[in-house]
Amino acid sequence: MNFDEARAQFPVLDRIAYLNAGSMGPLAQATVEAMAAREQADLERGRSGQPYIDDMLALRRRVRASVAGTIGVSPENVALTASTTQGCNIVVAGLRLGPEEEVVTTDTEHFGLIGPLHASAARVRVARIRELPPERAAETILAELSPKTRLLALSHVSWQTGNLLPVEELQEKTGLPVLVDGAQSAGAISVDASRYDFYTVSGQKWLCGPDSTGALYVRDPERLYVAQPTYFSQDRYDETGAYTPKAGAARFDGGWIPTASLAGLEAALGAIPQWAAHRAAEAAARCWTMLSDRFRVVTAPGQATLVSFATERDAAREAARLFDDGVVVRDLPGTGWLRVSCGWWTSDGDLDRLASAL
């Protein structure tokens, strides 16, 4: 599949320069058709009976395997969730952090990660890296560690600055468990999550899947407590609620996911071309160069697929104006920045349209 054929899967791109996959990716025609076909089948056949259950379970297995392939891990280590936020909650609750323990994070994290950290009993230490160049991030984060540190929790790619965070370096230097928020990396850049302890995946962003889909990688499921069990967590249970957990990370499955959403995610994952990460990186590099000629670009060169830049105008109003011009970007509240998401489907024409609208 060449670029033009791959891009043609997304009808919205015929009208709009869609540069906001960091929030929600565009939907492909095949994704919507798969969802509609599943809904039609449920309408005609009903949602009951053993064939329906068997089909639903088989669909979950296929999606689990497809997500695992996307981040380079075994399906046995993947739980299905409704979001990266749910994945973060599963991990933080499962670690059962106490008031004498500490978690180290950064000041450029999404609430989907820091919210669960705050809700835990642990003390949260925040490394101030948002205004620093990427090469200074590791030393700044390491300075927050103490003998009480139980967990490092940080993004692979900052949703604000677009910079890569030094998750591999930190893991090597500390040996601490690492919870990686992969919302802005899975589907955007090449990912091998197998080296990390926990890695969250968002289905509706760079994977271009339906709403409320996602996944969680757990390297050693036996070492994480199931603090939020669902019906899908167990193989069998008795009247007291005592149960035998599923093998592997399936014990952390976040519960029922509509079969239409699963079908749509399966279709979306199957539509990603092999050259996706390379093409997205090229688009981001062109975007960075284009913007740096006219604006203060917050994102360092050579990072991932988000490019944030400062505007002298009100960022929220500027994002709204661009939207009216058919250019979809995101303003980052409280920063005065606009954020451009460059996917593998982003064309030179999309970026030229952004430049013209600006």
Image (tube, helix red, strand yellow):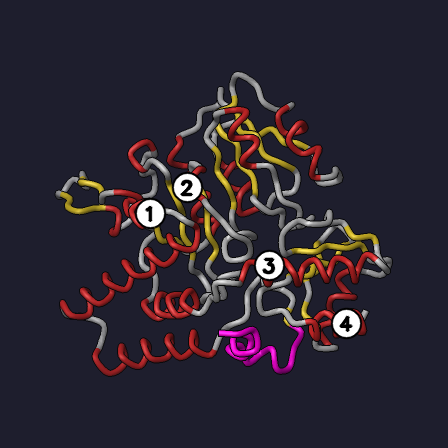
Rendering coords of residue 161 (x, y %): 69, 48
Q: Are marks 4 and 3 in contact (CB under 8 Å)?
A: no
Q: Quadrant of the C terminus?
A: bottom right
The earlier-in-sequence mark between 2 and 4 is: 2
Residue 130, compared with residue 50, is above or below; it is above
Q: Are marks 4 and 1 in contact (CB under 8 Å)?
A: no
Write the start and end of the magenta stretch as one range: 1-17
Disc number at residue 194? 2
Residue 85, compared with residue 31, is above or below; it is above
Q: Is residue 101 left or right of residue 129?
A: left
The earlier-in-sequence mark between 2 and 3 is: 3
Q: Quadrant of residue 237?
A: top left
Q: Which residue is mark 3?
A: 22
Is residue 333 covered in magenta?
A: no
Rendering coords of residue 214 (x, y %): 43, 56
Which marked residue is nearer to the observer: mark 2 or mark 4?
A: 2
Disc number at residue 271? none
- How far apart marks 4 and 1 lie (CA) works out to 45 Å
The earlier-in-sequence mark between 3 and 1 is: 3
Within-10-Å neighbours for mark 1: few <14, some 14–19, many 20+? some
Q: Element under label 3?
A: loop
Q: Are marks 2 and 3 in contact (CB under 8 Å)?
A: no
Q: Which residue is mark 1?
A: 74
Q: Element under label 1?
A: loop
Three-letter code, disc 3: Gly
The earlier-in-sequence mark between 1 and 2 is: 1
Q: Are marks 1 and 2 in contact (CB under 8 Å)?
A: yes
Disc number at residue 321? 4
Three-letter code, disc 1: Ser
The earlier-in-sequence mark between 4 and 3 is: 3
- How far apart marks 1 and 2 lie (CA) works out to 8 Å
Which marked residue is nearer to the observer: mark 4 or mark 3?
A: 3
